[in-house]
């Protein structure tokens, strides 16, 4: 029987009032939902965007997928800017800026005139807005996860942190459901003409709501404590160099985990609508039903995964998820080709296995770094890995299916990423139940325990 992970109760201050904690969770999840709403609607509207904003040709879909991927080029630059800034001026201030930039960029995609109207300027504008969206996203996810983790009580960080991923799937599912509703209500022809633009406009009010929620909160208790003790980062110009020198091990561990996480994420969630239409022959409506059903079921199980990680630890959840994905990927992709019903079953099975790691990342990743470099360490590493392996996943899958003729290639790619993730998680220190109020040592390590004990004794 697996025992409960130890809790550094002496180092943990009083929990935040329930109302404050709920507001912090909602503010974090809302921004994440806005971010992934953008990716969700873009993924399910690929064929319509291609028709409206690109010249028609043999590789038109490839160009649309490149527009999806181009935002990931800007994400590392966003991480380099927003991460150190968040450690210096605070998490809340940066998150208030990123959600506005992010939602405005998504909103503006719906305003781009068609290729027939302005020619090559249409795809140029799309690529430019995707770059802005990617730059702002470079600070959004790392900041939101850090914000959530630093507001959550140590003993329930997995449960509360999982609601950030609830927002992730909520954004994806909202995009799919809105697209499905418009397709049913407006019809295929109207969707191609102008209906595809409507979902992008919803990002505007979503961003304003998220900005309002974040502006009404104080910064995280952990950041305010570090600021009061003079332990926050002050030198944003040298922080990247300092990170590489002092924290290359947790950065390498995080990099490996993010490869596994995002290859699976973008292959399973973002590429799936295009895959089942182009490779399996499902209709646009069937593709939207498939991903909507799967995402809603995944949402329902995310909090359970987070809660289980508080009881059994983060690492066991990752091991079960990575091994499960490795074993089931090929059988489930073959099952998808049988019929629409079995495609839904296969997608749901893979999605629920993936949830075991997805539901723990907001508690696992921020805890790899001490407070003064947490935002920067997370944001920079996460976004570089995501840029290289997440945003390119759609293009890699599309390219190799075309080159090899093997439409099970996405399963092979996910299996490869799982092997990398298994190596990385082996070296990660378990942090479930451990305090993340460390100024120098990484949480969960013996050095951190000594530091926390000394701080508790001093107070």
Image (cartoon, grey):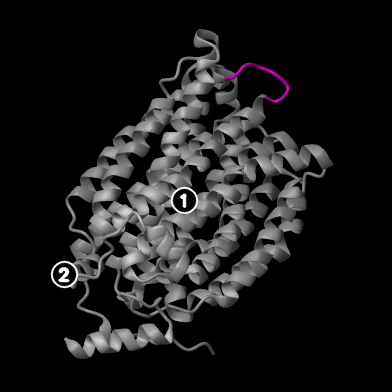
Q: Is residue 448 magenta?
A: no
Number of other residues with Cα within 10 Å of mark 2, as a class: few under 14, some 14 to 19, many 20 or more: few
Q: Is residue 371 left or right of residue 42?
A: left
Q: Is residue 379 left or right of residue 426?
A: left
| Residue 67 place in picture, x, y as percent | 55, 32
Q: Is residue 328 left or right of residue 192?
A: right
Number of other residues with Cα within 10 Å of mark 1, as a class: few under 14, some 14 to 19, many 20 or more: many
Tag 1 near tag 2, CB within 8 Å: no
Residue 169's tag is 1
Q: Residue at x 68, y 40 (%)?
A: 276
Q: Residue at x 77, y 41 (%)?
A: 401
- Asked if 113 appears above or below 364 in the picture, the reply is above
Read off the residue under disc 2: 228
Quadrant of the image containing the C terminus: bottom left
- Asked if 250 appears above or below 113 in the picture, the reply is below
Question: Which of 236 and 254 lies nearest the eye of the viewer?
Answer: 236
Quadrant of the image containing the N terminus: bottom right
Main secondary structure along the magenta-highlighted residues: loop
| Residue 405 place in picture, x, y as percent | 83, 40
- Asked if 433 appears above or below 34 in the picture, the reply is below
Q: Residue at x 46, y 28 (%)?
A: 128
Residue bounds of the magenta highlight: 54-59
| Residue 277 place in picture, x, y as percent | 68, 35
Q: Can residue 293 be spotted in the picture?
A: yes
Q: How far is the residue under mark 1 from the one under mark 2?
A: 36 Å
Q: Residue at x 26, y 80 (%)?
A: 12
């Amino acid at each position: 029987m697996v025992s409960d992970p130890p809790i550094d109760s002496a180092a943990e201050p009083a929990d935040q009032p329930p109302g404050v904690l709920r507001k912090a969770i909602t503010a974090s999840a809302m921004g994440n939902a806005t971010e992934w709403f953008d990716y969700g609607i873009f993924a399910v509207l690929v064929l319509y965007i291609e028709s409206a904003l690109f010249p028609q040709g043999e590789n038109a879909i490839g160009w649309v997928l490149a527009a999806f991927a181009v935002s990931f080029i800007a994400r590392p630059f966003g991480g380099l800017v927003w991460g150190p800034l968040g450690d210096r001026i605070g998490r809340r201030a940066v998150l208030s800026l990123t959600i506005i930039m992010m939602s405005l960029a998504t909103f503006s995609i719906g305003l781009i005139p068609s290729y027939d109207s302005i020619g090559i300027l249409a795809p140029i504008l799309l690529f430019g807005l995707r770059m802005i969206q990617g730059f702002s996203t470079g600070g959004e996810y790392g900041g939101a996860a850090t914000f959530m983790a630093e507001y959550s009580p140590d003993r329930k960080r997995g449960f509360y942190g999982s609601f950030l991923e609830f927002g992730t799937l909520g954004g994806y599912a909202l995009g799919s459901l809105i697209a499905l509703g418009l397709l049913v209500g407006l019809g295929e022809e109207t969707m191609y003409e102008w209906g595809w633009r409507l979902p992008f406009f919803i990002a505007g009010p979503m961003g304003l709501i998220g900005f309002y929620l974040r502006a009404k909160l104080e910064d995280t208790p952990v950041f305010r404590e570090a600021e009061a003790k003079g332990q926050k980062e002050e030198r944003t110009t040298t922080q990247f160099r300092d990170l590489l020198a002092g924290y290359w091990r947790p950065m390498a561990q995080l990099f490996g985990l993010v490869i596994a996480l995002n290859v699976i994420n973008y292959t399973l969630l973002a590429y799936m609508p295009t895959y089942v239409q182009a490779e399996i022959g499902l209709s646009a409506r069937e593709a939207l039903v498939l991903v909507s059903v799967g995402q809603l079921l995944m949402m329902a199980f995310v909090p359970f995964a987070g809660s289980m990680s508080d009881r059994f630890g983060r690492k066991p959840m990752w091991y079960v998820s990575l091994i499960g994905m490795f074993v089931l990927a090929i059988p489930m992709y073959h099952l998808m080709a049988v019929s629409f019903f079995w495609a839904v079953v296969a997608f749901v099975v893979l999605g629920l296995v993936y949830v075991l790691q997805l539901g723990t990342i907001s508690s696992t990743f921020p805890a790899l770094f001490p407070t003064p470099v947490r935002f920067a360490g997370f944001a920079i590493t996460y976004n570089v890995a995501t840029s290289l392996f997440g945003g390119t996943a759609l293009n890699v899958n599309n390219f190799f299916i075309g080159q090899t003729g093997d439409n099970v290639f996405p399963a092979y790619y996910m299996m490869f990423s799982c092997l990398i993730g298994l190596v990385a998680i082996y070296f990660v220190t378990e942090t479930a139940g451990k305090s993340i109020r460390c100024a120098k040592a990484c949480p969960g390590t013996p050095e951190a325990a000594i530091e926390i004990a000394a701080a508790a004794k001093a107070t």
